């Protein structure tokens, strides 16, 4: 578990630094806005998977799920979960 967190930190910290530095140089729109929503969605999906794991439930971890959760927030993640269970 500690190794996983260390790997996530080594990937997340440089991504965060590049993101923050690039946001100072460019307007807050376009591709960086999509990247921002994608990273937010990844965090939401990961947190929901941690919360749902004791109940043996999980969300699919893919870019579409992350974008839905990033743009719509928690309702987007719930929507993806419901659609996943129906199909």
Image (tube, rainbow, N blue to C red):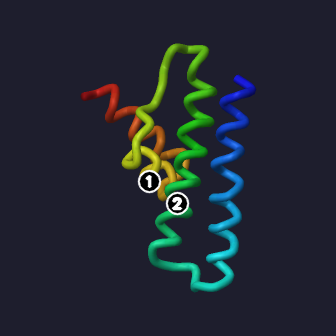
SS of the residue at dot 1? helix
**Mark 2 crowdedness (10 Å alpha carbons): few <14, some 14-19, many ≥20:** many
Q: CA distance from mark 1 to mark 2?
A: 6 Å
> Where the N terminus falls, by quadrant?
top right
Residue at the spot 53% in from the left edge and 50% down from the top edge: 41
Q: Which mark is residue 67?
A: 1
Residue at the spot 57% in from the left edge and 79% down from the top edge: 28
Q: Position of residue 83 (x, y in %)?
A: 32, 35
Residue in front for this viewpoint, 69 or 29: 29
Residue at the spot 64% in from the left edge and 85% down from the top edge: 25
Disc 1 and disc 2 in contact, CB within 8 angstroms: yes
Residue in front for this viewpoint, 64 or 22: 22
**Is residue 14 positioned above or below 75 on the image?**
below
Q: Which mark is residue 37?
A: 2
Q: Residue furthest left?
A: 87
**Label 1 or label 2, whichever comes before in sequence order:** 2
Q: Position of residue 45 (x, y in %)?
A: 53, 39
């Amino acid at each position: 578990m500690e190794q996983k967190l260390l790997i996530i930190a080594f990937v997340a910290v440089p991504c965060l630094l590049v993101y923050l530095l690039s946001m100072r140089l460019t307007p807050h729109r376009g591709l960086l806005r999509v990247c921002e929503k994608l990273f937010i969605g990844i965090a939401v999906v990961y947190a929901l998977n941690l919360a749902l794991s004791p109940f043996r439930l999980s969300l699919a971890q893919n870019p579409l799920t992350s974008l839905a959760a990033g743009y719509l927030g928690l309702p987007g993640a719930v929507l993806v979960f419901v659609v996943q269970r129906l199909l």
